[in-house]
Image: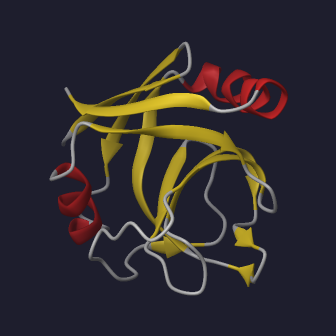
Amino acid sequence: MTRLKITAGPFAFVGKLEEEAAPKTCAAFLSRLPFESQVVHVRWSGEGVWMPLGDYQFGVDYENHTSYPAPGQIILYPGGISETEILLAYGGVHFASKVGQLAGNHFITLVEGLENLTPLGKMCLWKGAQPIRFEKM
């Protein structure tokens, strides 16, 4: 099981890659580590934070995709009718964009630091963008 250290704002998390359910997405993401971006609060999806990535391509299609990630699940939308993005759910999420419902590949599940999900979400909502970094443990 491949584990990642994820630092978002002042919070630290440990995530496991869902390599059996989303092998291509996990491999594509691993090849880009360390991965750094900024995380902001979602606009349409509910209780989540996201990394808008524009036309950045991971070279993957749908696998293990969902529109309803559970708290602590991270999904990758590979692009298409909306921009490429990564979303981390901290509460109830119905994944969507200005063009409507989307589905993203569930490829990481947080296994440590879950108590910091809601504080991260509220920090992004009220204080704005926070740096995020993914690295292999």
Between 46 and 56, which is closer to the camera in this rendering? 56
Q: Is residue 63 above or below residue 1?
A: below
Q: Quadrant of residue 55?
A: bottom left
Residue sitting farthest toward the top: 10
Residue sitting farthest toward the front: 55
Residue 101, percent from left and from top: 72, 80
Between 37 and 88, which is closer to the camera in this rendering? 37
Q: Is residue 38 above or below residue 27?
A: above
Q: What colour scheme does the image use?
A: secondary structure
Residue 103, percent from left and from top: 58, 76
Q: Is residue 109 above or below residue 86?
A: above
Q: Is residue 129 left or right of residue 111?
A: right
Residue name at image x 73 percent, y 72 percent: 97
Residue name at image x 58 percent, y 39 percent: 39
Q: Is residue 75 left or right of residue 24?
A: right
Between 15 and 85, which is closer to the camera in this rendering? 85
Residue name at image x 21 percent, y 50 percent: 32
Quadrant location of the N terminus? top left
Q: Quadrant of residue 62?
A: bottom left
Quadrant location of the C terminus? top left
Residue 117, percent from left and from top: 64, 29
